[in-house]
């Protein structure tokens, strides 16, 4: 068996104790992190190596964004990808044990869901389209996993209230249409929804602004793990580790965990 965890940590150096808990309690073989908010020289390599992650692929920048893949197994063909003409540390890809693994951090898009008046929202839409077009050209029969913080809750039951969220960035029709197009173009399986099909409500993010988040449960499923057909049949479990939102100094996102049969070597 193989375990892959995915988490927007919202500053890796702030979450080391929570990362230690994730590693100790769930024993992932591979960690995909987003929003690490660290230059490469400031990344806590020693911490992860002490936890058994000898292989590290990193695309960092000062103060913002940043993605990393940490593995107990050798990484090959490390690629940093740029979209929309920006070198903003949002996509890193590797090959590990026969799996093509992509770690994505899609832009949030700001507050105003209008591409003409809000450049951040226009950037987000263009980013999703470019990435979707890229995967449309790739071989859908390769063992492939695409995961990360996509900053879009694409399905009705990925948000606490579909009708109220339609004009809120992360669930607007402009975003959900593009993300679902990306999903279809890549011929992906939604690992979480395979385990928890609609109409079950599934969330991976609860706002820091919502102090009563546990009571009102106004969440969104912004984090995703999508796989190609050769991996879909190997899924043993895929889950959202929501307990991490209630711990001390949490990220507003919680980890996802995918377990595959067959192992990786």
Image (cartoon, helix red, strand yellow):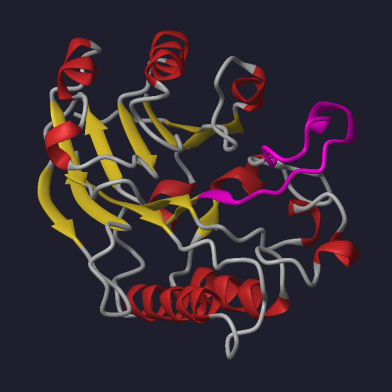
Please name the residue shown 33% across and 26% down the image.
13
- Residue found 40% across the figure and 24% down from its top: 14
Q: Nearer the viewer, residue 94 or 173?
A: 173
Quadrant housing the N terminus = top left
**Residue 220 colored in magenta in the image:** yes
**Magenta stretch contains residue 12:** no
Quadrant where the C terminus is found in the figure? top left
Q: Position of residue 64 (x, y in %)?
A: 35, 50
Q: Nearer the viewer, residue 13 or 215?
A: 13
Q: Majority secondary structure of the magenta segment? A: loop
Question: Is 98 placed above or below 138 here?
Answer: above
In which image quadrant can residue 110 be found? bottom right
Residue plotted at (16% across, 24% down)? 45
Side of 85 relative to 33 (left or right): left
Residue 63 in the image: x percent, y percent?
32, 46
Q: Which residues are magenta?
A: 206-224
Residue 114 at x, y percent in the picture: 65, 83
Q: Is residue 117 above or below residue 77?
A: below
């Amino acid at each position: 068996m193989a375990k892959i965890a995915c988490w927007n940590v919202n500053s890796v150096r702030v979450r080391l104790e929570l990362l230690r808990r994730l590693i100790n309690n769930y024993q992932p073989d591979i960690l995909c992190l987003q929003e690490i908010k660290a230059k490469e020289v400031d990344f806590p390599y020693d911490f992860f190596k002490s936890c058994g992650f000898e292989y590290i692929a990193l695309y960092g920048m000062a103060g913002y964004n940043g993605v990393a893949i940490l593995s107990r197994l050798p990484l090959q063909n490390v690629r940093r990808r740029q979209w929309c003409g920006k070198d903003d540390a949002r996509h890193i890809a590797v090959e590990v044990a026969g799996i093509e693994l992509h770690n994505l951090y899609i832009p949030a898009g700001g507050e105003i869901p209008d591409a003409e008046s809000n450049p951040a929202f226009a950037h987000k839409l263009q980013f999703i389209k470019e990435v979707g077009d890229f995967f449309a050209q790739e071989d859908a029969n390769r063992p492939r996993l695409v995961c990360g913080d996509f900053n879009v809750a694409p399905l009705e039951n990925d948000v606490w209230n579909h009708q109220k969220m339609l004009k809120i960035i992360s669930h607007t029709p402009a975003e959900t249409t593009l993300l679902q197009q990306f999903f279809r173009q890549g011929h992906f399986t939604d690992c979480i929804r395979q385990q928890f099909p609609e109409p079950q409500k599934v969330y991976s993010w609860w706002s820091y602004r919502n102090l009563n988040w546990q009571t009102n449960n106004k969440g969104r499923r912004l984090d995703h793990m999508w796989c190609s057909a050769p991996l879909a049949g190997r899924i043993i479990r895929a889950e959202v580790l929501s307990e991490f939102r209630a711990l001390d100094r949490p990220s507003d996102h919680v980890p996802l965990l995918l377990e595959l049969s067959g192992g990786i070597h």
